Image (cartoon, rainbow, N blue to C red):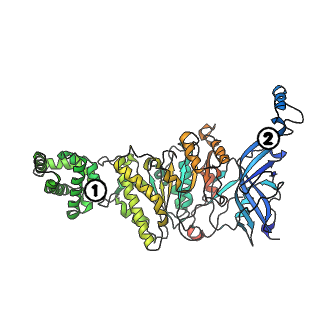
C-alpha cells in the first residue's frame, strides 16, 4: 500500500459526520456530542471519500455553527420552557448542532503524492469529518512544487494556514503571469503589517523586483530596520539581507525629475508666471509650453536650476509674448517687466531665489540625487540575477525647504514613476520578456479614489493613469498590490481587478459592508468576517488578534474559490520561525527548487 492510500484520519479527532442537505461546495456537518463544547468556527476540517476508484480528501473551514431543537419549535413547548426553563428529555438532550463546512480544496491519491482534484459528487451522509492539523497539511502538500509561506493560523485555530506568493515569471516558483492584489482594513487592523509580511515572502525570489510607493515613510523605516510606534515590527532590512535581496531607498531629497514632459505643468503649477501678471489658466498653459520648448533646444535638463537658465527663460518668454497676448497695454506692461528683470542683476537674483529655484530644485542632480527614470531603469533591469527592493519615500516631512511640494507635485512624481514602469514594461514585452515586478501602492484610497471632484488636475490624471494601469500592465509582468483603509472610497476598478484580496477588521458597516458584499456573496463567510474582534479590545498587546478574510488563489487550499480566514501572527519571531527566516543568511538561488512545507 502506498503512502497516499493510507488513511490520514488515523489518530485524528472526529468532530462530526456529513448531514443533509449537503452539496459539492458546502457540507452540512452534524456535530457529535463530544464536539459541541469545543471551539469549532474557523477550524480546518477534512473528510475522506472514494471517487473514481481513488481515495480523496476534502478540506474546508467551518464558517458557521447553528443550534436546532425540533421539539422546541412547537408553541406549546416554547410556553413550557418560558415558565420552567428546562424540560427533561427535550432541552439540551434533543439539541442538534450543525456546522457549515465550506469546501476549499480536494486532493486525490497520485503515484507518489496527493494531487489536486475536485468534488464531482457528494459523499454519503454519515461520512466522518475530522479536525485537520499541520501534519495532515504536510502530507497533502508534499508534492506541491512551489514554496509555501505562512503568515498565521486558520482563524481561531492552532493549524497554520499555508499561502503562496509566486513571482510573476516562469520557473518552479513562478506563476508565469502577473496579478493584482489588495490589503484592506481600517487603521489599526494590521493591514500594513500584513502587507510587509507579504512583501517579505516575495523577497524570497531573486528574479523578482519590488517597487514600493511609500507616502508616509512606514516601509522606509522597515527597510532601514528602524522601529516606529508599531507593536509588531517587521524588520524588512534583515529579511532582505537574509535572502540576498538588495535594498535601494530613495526619498524626495534623493530623487530628481529627468524627463521634460512634466516641466510645463510644473511651471504652470508654480507662482512663477504670476510675477508677470500672466494669470489666466489658458495664457499660463501657453506660456509654460513656450518656455519649456525654448529650454529643450538650448539647455540641458540637469542645468535647469541656474540663474543663466533663468535668463534663457525670460528671453524666450519675451520673444514669445506677442504670440501669447495681442498688442496692447497688457503686452507692453509684461514686456517691460521682463526687461526690468533682465536689466537688473539684483532683481534677477531675487526672482531666481524666491521663484525659479523652487522649480529647478525638482531637476537638480547632485552626488546624492538621481533621476527617477534612471533609478527605475537600473532597478528593473531584467538582466540582473538578483533584482532589488526599491522603496520611494514620498513622506512630505522629507521635502527640502527650498522645494515646492503639495498633493499636485506628489501626483506628478508618482506619474513619472508609473510612466517609467509602464514604458520599461512595454520594452520588456516587445523583447519577449516580462518585467516580473511587484508595485506596492500604500494609502491607495488617496491616490485612486472613487470620487474625483475635489482632486487637483494632476491628481485626476494620476487617478486615471492608475485605473488604466490596473487594466493593462499585467501583460507586461507588473502586478500591483494596493493597501487601503477603505473599500467604499476606492475606485471600483481597483478592487474589481484584484485577483487576491485580504480584508481586515472594520469593513463591516455601512457603505464599506455594501462594497464588500459586491466581492463576497457568501452570507456565511460575511457573517464570520463580521465576527472579527477589534484588535484593540485585547487586554494586552500580546493578546491582540489580527484577523483577515482572504479571497483568491493565494493558497494551495483555496482553489475552489471559497474565502479562507486567517489570524495573522502577532510577533515577528513566530513569522520568521514558521518561514525559516530565523536562520542566518540563505541563498534562494541555491535553494529555489526546494519547497518549504509548514512546521509540523
Percent across and percent down for residue 295 are: 21, 60
Q: Nearer the viewer, residue 427 or 279?
A: 279
Q: Secondary structure at mark 2?
A: strand
Q: Does 167 sit left or right of 322 as displayed?
A: right
- The quadrant holding residue 203 is bottom right
- Quadrant of the image containing the N terminus: bottom right
Determine which of the numbered discs, if any, sits on residue 68 in the image. Answer: 2
Q: Looking at the image, tell me whether mark 1 or mark 2 is earlier in sequence order.
A: 2
C-beta proximity under 8 Å, tags 1 and 2: no
Graded by Cα atoms within 10 Å as few (under 14), some (14 to 19) or many (20 or more), the crowding at tag 2 reads few
Q: Does 230 sit left or right of 321 as displayed?
A: right
Q: Residue at x 15, y 53 (%)?
A: 321
Which of the two marks, 1 or 2, is nearer to us in this view?
A: 2
Q: Nearer the viewer, residue 412 or 559?
A: 559
Q: Residue furthest front?
A: 75
Label 1 sits on residue = 263
Percent across and percent down for residue 235 are: 53, 53
Q: Residue at x 84, y 45 (%)?
A: 33
Q: Is residue 578 visible?
A: yes
Q: Is residue 235 visible?
A: no
Could you tell me how far apart the alpha carbons at marks 1 and 2 are, in whole angstroms? 70 Å
Q: Residue at x 20, y 63 (%)?
A: 298
- Quadrant of the image containing the C terminus: bottom right
Determine which of the numbered discs, if any, sits on residue 393 in the image. Answer: none
Graded by Cα atoms within 10 Å as few (under 14), some (14 to 19) or many (20 or more), the crowding at tag 1 reads many
Q: Secondary structure at mark 1?
A: helix
Q: Nearer the viewer, residue 510 or 352?
A: 510
Percent across and percent down for residue 301 are: 26, 61
Amino acid at each position: 500500500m502506498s503512502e497516499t492510500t493510507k488513511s490520514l484520519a488515523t489518530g485524528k479527532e472526529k468532530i462530526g459526520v456529513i448531514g443533509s442537505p449537503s452539496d459539492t461546495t458546502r457540507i452540512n456537518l452534524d456535530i457529535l456530542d463530544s464536539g459541541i463544547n469545543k471551539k469549532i468556527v474557523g477550524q480546518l476540517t477534512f473528510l475522506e471519500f472514494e471517487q473514481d476508484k481513488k481515495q480523496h480528501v476534502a478540506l474546508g473551514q467551518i464558517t458557521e455553527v447553528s443550534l436546532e431543537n425540533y421539539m422546541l419549535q412547537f408553541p406549546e413547548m416554547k410556553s413550557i420552557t418560558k415558565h420552567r426553563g428546562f424540560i427533561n428529555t427535550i432541552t439540551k438532550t434533543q439539541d442538534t448542532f450543525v456546522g457549515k463546512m465550506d469546501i476549499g480544496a480536494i486532493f486525490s491519491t497520485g503515484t507518489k503524492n496527493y494531487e489536486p482534484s475536485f468534488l464531482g459528487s457528494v459523499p454519503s451522509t454519515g461520512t466522518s469529518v475530522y479536525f485537520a492539523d499541520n501534519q495532515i497539511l504536510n502530507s497533502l502538500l508534499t508534492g506541491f512544487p512551489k514554496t509555501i509561506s505562512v503568515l498565521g493560523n486558520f482563524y481561531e485555530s492552532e493549524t497554520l494556514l499555508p499561502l503562496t506568493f509566486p513571482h510573476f515569471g516562469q520557473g518552479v516558483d513562478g506563476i508565469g503571469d502577473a496579478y493584482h492584489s489588495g490589503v484592506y482594513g481600517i487603521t489599526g487592523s494590521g493591514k500594513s503589517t500584513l502587507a510587509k509580511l507579504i512583501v517579505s515572502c516575495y523577497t524570497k525570489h531573486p528574479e523578482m523586483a519590488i517597487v514600493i510607493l511609500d507616502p508616509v515613510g512606514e516601509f522606509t523605516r522597515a527597510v532601514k530596520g528602524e522601529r516606529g510606534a508599531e507593536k509588531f515590527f517587521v524588520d524588512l532590512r534583515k529579511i532582505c539581507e537574509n535572502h540576498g535581496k538588495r535594498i535601494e531607498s530613495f526619498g524626495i531629497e534623493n530623487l530628481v525629475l529627468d524627463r521634460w514632459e512634466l516641466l510645463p505643468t510644473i511651471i504652470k503649477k508654480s507662482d512663477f508666471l504670476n510675477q508677470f501678471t500672466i494669470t489666466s489658466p489658458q495664457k499660463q498653459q501657453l506660456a509654460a509650453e513656450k518656455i519649456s520648448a525654448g529650454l529643450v533646444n538650448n539647455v540641458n535638463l540637469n542645468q535647469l536650476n541656474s540663474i543663466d537658465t533663468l535668463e534663457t527663460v525670460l528671453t524666450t518668454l519675451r520673444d514669445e509674448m506677442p504670440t501669447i497676448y495681442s498688442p496692447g497695454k497688457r503686452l507692453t506692461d509684461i514686456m517691460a517687466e521682463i526687461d526690468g528683470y533682465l536689466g537688473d542683476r539684483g532683481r534677477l537674483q531675487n526672482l531666481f531665489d524666491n521663484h525659479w529655484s523652487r522649480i529647478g530644485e525638482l531637476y537638480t542632480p547632485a552626488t546624492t540625487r538621481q533621476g527617477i527614470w534612471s533609478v527605475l531603469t537600473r532597478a528593473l533591469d531584467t538582466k540582473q540575477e538578483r533584482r532589488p527592493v526599491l522603496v520611494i519615500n514620498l513622506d512630505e516631512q522629507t521635502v527640502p525647504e527650498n522645494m515646492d511640494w503639495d498633493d499636485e507635485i506628489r501626483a506628478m512624481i508618482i506619474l513619472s514613476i508609473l510612466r517609467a514602469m509602464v514604458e520599461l514594461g512595454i520594452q520588456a514585452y516587445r523583447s519577449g520578456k516580462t518585467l516580473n515586478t511587484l508595485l506596492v501602492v500604500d494609502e491607495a484610497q488617496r491616490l485612486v479614489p472613487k470620487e474625483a471632484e475635489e482632486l487637483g488636475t494632476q491628481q485626476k490624471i494620476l487617478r486615471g493613469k492608475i485605473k488604466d494601469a490596473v487594466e493593462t500592465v499585467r501583460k507586461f509582468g507588473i502586478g500591483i498590490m494596493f493597501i487601503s483603509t477603505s473599500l467604499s472610497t476606492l475606485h471600483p476598478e481597483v478592487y474589481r481587478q484584484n485577483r487576491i484580496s485580504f480584508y481586515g477588521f472594520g469593513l463591516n458597516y455601512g457603505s464599506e459592508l455594501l462594497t464588500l458584499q459586491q466581492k463576497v456573496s457568501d452570507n456565511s463567510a460575511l457573517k464570520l468576517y463580521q465576527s472579527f474582534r477589534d484588535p484593540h479590545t485585547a487586554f494586552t498587546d500580546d493578546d491582540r488578534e489580527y484577523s483577515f478574510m482572504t479571497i483568491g488563489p493565494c493558497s494551495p487550499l483555496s482553489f475552489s474559490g471559497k474565502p479562507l480566514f486567517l489570524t495573522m501572527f502577532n510577533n515577528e519571531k513566530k513569522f520568521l520561525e514558521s518561514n525559516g527566516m530565523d536562520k542566518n543568511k540563505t541563498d534562494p538561488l541555491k535553494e529555489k527548487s526546494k519547497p518549504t512545507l509548514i512546521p509540523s
